[in-house]
Image (cartoon, rainbow, N blue to C red):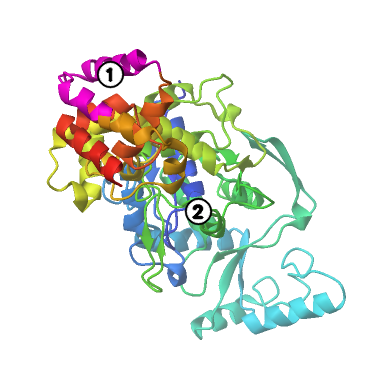
Amino acid sequence: MMSNVRVRFAPSPTGPLHIGGVRTALFNYLFAKKHGGSFVLRIEDTDQNRFVEGAEDYIVKSMEWLNIPFDESPAKPGQFGPYRQSERKAMYKQYADQLVAEGKAYYAFDTAEQLDTHRKDHEANGKTFIYNWHNREKGRLVNSLVLSEEDVKAKIDAGEDYVIRFKSPQDETLVLQDIIRGEIKIDTNILDDKVLFKSDGMPTYHLANIVDDHLMKISHVIRGEEWLPSLALHYLLYDAFDWDAPEFAHLPLILKPTGKGKLSKRDGDKLGFPVFPLEWNDPKTNDVSRGYKEDGYFPEAVVNFLAFLGWNPGTEQEIFSLDELVNTFDLKKVNKAGARFDPDKTKWFNHHYMQVQSNANLAEAFKNSTSDLADIDINYIEMVIDLVKERATFVSDFWNLTHFLFAAPKEFDAKALKKAIKDDTKPLLEELVGVVEQADDSSKDTLQTAVKGWITSKEIGFGKVMMPLRVALVGALQGPDVFDIMFMIGKAESLKRIQNLIEA
């Protein structure tokens, strides 16, 4: 077991949590628990312009629903708080100033308009503008590398807007390590001088991220592939501060079910599946986005299918409890290639977890889902659930599978009537009424023995009676075993429904 493993999930509260983010949180949690470590939630809210009210609460509630608890968070502080970057604001400036004082970063006073002019000039000549070693000291850009100390101080004292940029090295080759991707080489000449501190007094993601990970003693940074381009800068920052860097692991993208590109909300809307763990009501537009919870998925199913998006245990086993995932998980078994999202597979997982739910819990959920069951005894609903559970994927499936067990059919399916009703059907059903009236209905088996014995004695095909009997009871050629239905609804109701078909 590794010593002092500390990982963090560090989302930005800019909207609902995409299942890609949930997958990142899950892999961090599994890794931490596998190695007896700590799983930390840090809210990275330095970008106040994109802050969305309610997003942080949504993130926390999503993790609670999935039963993935944090060891430390804004609501459960440890010794490394605060756990929101906005509350750590005062500490970042000193680190940015330290880099400037050591000549590893510099003040840049270029306005947005000036930078836009440089970009357009480069584009006109078929080039790409990069703010770095190539042009930072040529005099065209306004920064402390070309200005005198007096001019820099005068600009700052005058309240001119400035940013602090990292001074990326020239003519170096970085050799970086990633647990999932192995060795990565980067030519520093292609790197730009990233902004570390903004004119609004807030750090950028890059500075705050590095400082926080260091101060919170994060040992492993497990994050999405989209952060790979930042890996070189982050290594350089650790080196600039003379800090030990954590180990990095960049998870593969979750790809859309068909075509190219990563999974988006649009894919879910188009193909009819959610991409968020919980329903999200946008506070600005009031648009409502679907959630896995509200769509009827079990949290265990969501955790199980997310674990397989990019990771494989190397065995045939597909069903894992959270504890089993913890014991089996290995970052080295995470794939580099993107993981294709399969909506049908997610339903397959949910169907499995439906089967292991208790009938009592499912009956309660089913009863709460429709007013049609308000007056129905919960014990009867449990018996109904037991009959059809194997055919259900969601609680919402139960009504279509069982409505005839609560109320007689009001009409008969036309195709079923055409297939089941023949010239001699009515006399057979009339005779069947007498058989059922005399039958022992103390169990399904006694009913079955009586009816099947009569059919056999008449030397007719079972379909001539069983198909119209099913139509009478259900209204269609579907449903569980006919004798289960008869036993559940009782002899009197069964006779009434048979008579209804005879008179139809």
Report the quarter where the N terminus lies.
Answer: top left
* In this picture, residue 244 sits left or right of residue 82: right
Mark 1 vs 2, N-terminal side: 2
Residue 50: horizontal and vertical position, in percent?
46, 69
Q: Is residue 77 visible?
A: yes
Distance from the alpha carbon under mark 1 to that under mark 2: 42 Å
Asked whether 63 or 250 is in front, the reply is 63
* In this picture, residue 469 sits left or right of residue 141: left
Q: Which residue is found at the position 41% from the left and 23% from the top? A: 324
Indicate yes or no whether the magenta region holds residue 433: yes
Report the magenta stretch's main SS.
helix
* In this picture, residue 280 sits left or right of residue 342: left
Q: Quadrant of residue 66?
A: top left
Q: Which residue is found at the position 39% from the left and 55% from the top? A: 43
Residue 146: horizontal and vertical position, in percent?
71, 74
Q: Is residue 219 visible?
A: no
Q: Is residue 278 above or below residue 289?
A: above
What amino acid is at disc 2?
A: Gly
Indicate yes or no whether the magenta region holds residue 256: no
| Magenta residues, start to end | 431-459
Reading the image, the residue beneath label 1 is: 448
Asked whether 422 or 404 is in front, the reply is 422
Residue contact between numbered discs 1 and 2, judged by CB atoms under 8 Å: no
Q: Report the number of discs.
A: 2
Q: Quadrant of residue 142?
A: bottom right
Q: Which mark is residue 272?
A: 2
Residue 334: horizontal and vertical position, in percent?
59, 32
Secondary structure at badge 1 equals helix
